[in-house]
Image (cartoon, rainbow, N blue to C red):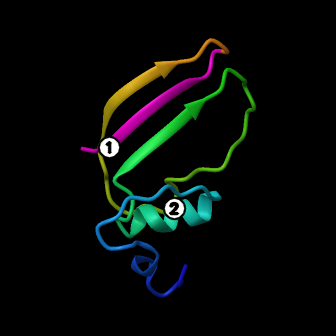
Amino acid sequence: MDEGNPETIKPAGKNFIVYGGSSFVSALIKEDLIDEFDFFINPVAVGKGWPIFEKLDTFRPLKLKKATVFDCGTVLLKYELG
């Protein structure tokens, strides 16, 4: 990713999946390059984590599109920007 211009990673008119650390994902969210979120909730209490929304300076509502519960107890929550 070109740190000066995150838009350079988005192919015009194409969808793509991003996996990365909280700093990378935060930068994409801040630049409005993410329009859908898939959150996997695992049935484990860790007590700590990496906040992906920490660097946002504006409110961005999310709308739940779908929730899927797997036999192992993991839940997939699919959101889009509302």
User: Crowding at label 1, few (<14), some or many (≥20) Cα neighbours within 10 Å?
Assistant: some
Q: Viewed as shown, does residue 25 lie left or right of 13?
A: right
Q: Nearer the viewer, residue 23 or 9?
A: 9
Q: Which residue is mark 2?
A: 26
Which residue is most to the front?
14
On residue 80, the disc is: 1
Amino acid carrying label 1: it is: Glu
Real-space CA distance between mark 1 and mark 2, rounded to the nearest whole angstrom: 16 Å
For the point 72% across and 24% down, which residue is it?
44
71 within the magenta span: no
Tell me the quadrant of the picture where the C terminus can be found. top left
Which residue sits furthest bottom? Answer: 4
Q: Residues within 10 Å of mark 2 (few under 14, many from 20)?
A: some
- Verify whether residue 79 appears in magenta: yes
Q: Residue at x 57, y 33 (%)?
A: 40
What secondary structure characterizes most of the magenta part? strand
Residue 80 x/y as whole percent: 32, 43
- Say which element carries label 2: helix
Q: Are dots 1 and 2 in contact, CB under 8 Å?
A: no
Q: Which one is in front in this view, the residue at disc 1 or the one at disc 2? A: 1
Residue span colored magenta: 73-82
Which image quarter is the N terminus in? bottom right
Query: Which residue appears farthest toward the right when viewing the image?
Result: 46
Q: Position of residue 24 (x, y in %)?
A: 58, 66
Tag 1's secondary structure? strand
User: Looking at the picture, which amino acid does disc 2 mark?
Assistant: Ser
